[in-house]
Image (tube, rainbow, N blue to C red):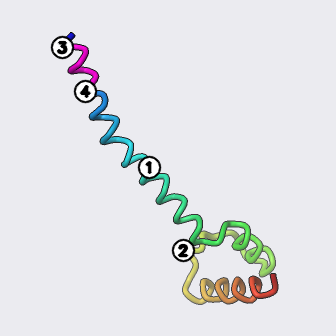
Amino acid sequence: MRFWLKNLSLSLLVAILTCPVLMTGCKTQTTTESVQQGPSDYTQWEHETQRQHVDLEKRNAEEQKEYHDWQQSHNQHH
């Protein structure tokens, strides 16, 4: 009986310590996506301005500013 109780206690401890780590990983991904306004806006900007697809973070500062300016003017119209 002690063997099963010890294994159950150890399993519960592992589950309790693991759950917050897993939940934090999911929350971080959701937060990142919500900050970026979604990929559809960025893809639309690339299409409308006839640019090759490149991750926004890899674009130079001038292009990032152009995208943010476009996004603000585009969102004002909707």
Question: Quick one: label 1, few (<14), some, or many (20+) residues within 10 Å?
Answer: few
The stretch in magenta equals: 2-10
Q: Distance between the residues labelled 1 and 4?
A: 22 Å
Disc sitting over residue 2 in the figure: 3
Disc sitting over residue 57 in the figure: 2
Q: Left or right? Give the position of 3 relative to 62.
A: left
Badge 4 element? helix
Instruction: Identify the amino acid type marked 3.
Output: Arg
Q: How far apart are marks 2 and 3 (CA)?
A: 55 Å
Disc sitting over residue 9 in the figure: 4
- The residue at 58%/78% (across/down) is 59
What percent of the width, then of the height, locates residue 42?
Answer: 69, 73
Q: Left or right? Give the position of 61 relative to 25.
A: right
The residue nearer to you, when weighing 57 against 18, is 18
Proximity of marks 1 and 4: CB atoms separated by less than 8 Å: no
Question: Quick one: label 3, few (<14), some, or many (20+) residues within 10 Å?
Answer: few
Residue 3 covered by magenta stretch:
yes
Nearer the N terminus, badge 1 or badge 4?
Answer: 4
The residue nearer to you, when weighing 70 against 26, is 26
Instruction: Identify the amino acid type marked 2.
Output: Glu
Tell me the mark number nearer the camera, choosing from 4 and 2: 4
User: Of helix, strand and loop, which mostly describes the magenta segment?
Assistant: helix
